[in-house]
């Protein structure tokens, strides 16, 4: 065991604070990674504040991890000391079910193991995430990171990136498609970058006029204010796909009516209450509502390789760990462009 520095939530009501955790010694198939950067996901807030009702305390959040390999187990084949490595939302799964064998570990039929706020396969050992200086992960759940990219800006690709890349690939979005991206935040800004790079015509749908310049800078071809009734009406039956990244309550029907025949609304945001969707809003134009989680390990590696080839990273604001509680408050106000990333060297201060 190795005792290391971390930041943890002790309960749902108190701020995150310094904490010490133990990491296991690397086993035969394990990779030990010195964490250099960790992205801050909105789900970190939900779980640290027990808003989903499944929190395990004390909790060390963080599942957008980039670092450098410091030790490897005797049977590790993919990594050597000094390599760059990443860890996303998962650190294990049953590896035996149909989904796991298909490289869809995120949908493990027996329950995947989250990087934090989860229990290992033994059912009793809690997992601790990337708000720490070091992590030990099986090489099967460790990812190779392109060396040509800004490492801090790579970190959010491990969640925000794959959450938008995966559905765009699944629905084969590309040239000739019209794509609307609803919400310009951590997920939305990556959806714009990927959809544009895949050759689609991309329209940013946002309630914030101030985001138009950013949307265009990110590559969006058009910007449409959701409060612009006439503009919204003109885009009835317009889109092949709408990527809905919004987790706040909103009316799905407004956007379903903007889909063409056979269009699909892809939900990657998770509003707190069920949506009310009249069947005729789907039936009359054979529209669909789909959902998507992150991606499996093979697809996440594919995404990282694609980003390395096309120089795609997240737009970030780098912070020391000591500002994490302030960052949470700012995220709730939408005051970040578009992902906070922790410089974990600050844990050693």
Image (spheres, rainbow, N blue to C red):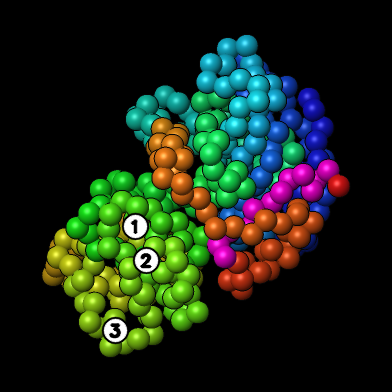
- What is the number of the mark on residue 220? 2
The reply to whether callout 2 and callout 1 are in contact (CB within 8 Å) is yes
Packing grade of label 1 (10 A; few <14, some 14-19, many >=20) is many
Contact, CB < 8 Å: mark 1 with mark 3? no
- Name the residue that disc number 3 marks: 231
* Extent of the magenta region: 337-348
Residue at (57% x, 65% y) in the render: 337
Of the residues tagged 3 and 2, which is closer to the observer?
2
- Mark toward the start of the polypeptide (3 vs 2): 2
Judged from this view, the residue extending furthest toward the right is: 349
Residue closer to the observer: 26 or 149: 149
| 1 vs 3, front mark | 1
Query: How packed is label 2: few (under 14 Cα within 10 Å), some, or many (20 or more)?
Result: many
Q: CA distance from mark 1 to mark 3?
A: 22 Å
Looking at the picture, tell me which residue is in the foreground, 63 or 218: 218
On the image, numbered disc 1 is attached to which residue? 196
Q: Is residue 75 magenta?
A: no
Among numbered discs 2 and 1, the one appearing first in the sequence:
1
Local crowd size for mark 3, using a 10 Å CA cut-off: few (<14), some (14–19), many (≥20): few
Q: Residue at x 71, y 57 (%)?
A: 319
Residue drawn at x 53%, y 39% as measured from the top left: 148
Give residue 300's quadrant in the image: top left
Label 1, secondary structure: give it. helix
Query: Can you name the residue that lies furthest to the top here?
Result: 74
Q: Is residue 345 above or below residue 254?
A: above
Q: Measured from the top left, where is residue 326 in percent x and y?
A: 73, 65
The Cα–Cα distance between marks 2 and 1, rounded to whole angstroms, is 7 Å
């Amino acid at each position: 065991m190795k005792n290391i520095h971390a930041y943890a939530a002790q309960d749902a009501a108190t701020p995150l604070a310094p904490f010490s955790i133990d990491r296991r010694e690397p086993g035969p198939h394990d990779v030990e990674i010195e964490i250099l950067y960790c992205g801050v996901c909105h789900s970190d807030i939900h779980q640290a504040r027990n808003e989903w009702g499944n929190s395990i305390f004390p909790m060390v959040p963080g599942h957008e991890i980039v670092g450098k390999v410091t030790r490897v187990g005797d049977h590790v084949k993919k990594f050597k000391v000094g390599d760059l490595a990443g860890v996303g939302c998962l650190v294990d799964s049953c590896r035996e079910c149909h989904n796991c064998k298909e490289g869809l570990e995120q949908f493990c039929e027996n329950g995947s193991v989250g990087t934090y706020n989860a229990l290992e396969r033994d059912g009793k050992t809690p997992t601790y995430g990337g708000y720490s200086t070091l992590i030990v992960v099986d090489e099967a759940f460790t990812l190779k990171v392109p060396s040509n990219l800004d490492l801090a800006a790579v970190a959010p690709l491990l969640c925000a990136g794959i959450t938008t890349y995966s559905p765009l690939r699944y629905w084969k979005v590309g040239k000739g498609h019209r794509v609307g991206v609803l919400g310009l935040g951590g997920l939305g800004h990556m959806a714009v970058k990927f959809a544009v790079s895949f050759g689609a015509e991309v329209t940013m749908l946002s309630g914030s006029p101030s985001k138009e310049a950013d949307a265009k800078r990110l590559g969006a071809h058009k910007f449409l204010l959701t409060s612009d009734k006439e503009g919204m009406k003109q885009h009835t039956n317009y889109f092949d796909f709408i990527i809905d990244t919004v987790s706040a309550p909103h009316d799905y029907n407004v956007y379903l009516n903007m889909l063409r025949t056979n269009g699909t609304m892809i939900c990657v945001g998770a509003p707190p209450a069920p949506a009310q969707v009249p069947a005729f809003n789907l039936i009359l134009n054979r529209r669909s509502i789909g959902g998507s989680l992150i991606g499996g390990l093979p697809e996440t590696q594919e995404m990282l390789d694609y980003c390395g080839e096309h120089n795609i990273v997240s737009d970030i604001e780098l912070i020391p760990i000591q500002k994490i509680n302030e960052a949470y408050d700012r995220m709730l106000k939408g005051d970040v462009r578009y992902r906070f990333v922790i410089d974990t060297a600050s844990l050693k201060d």
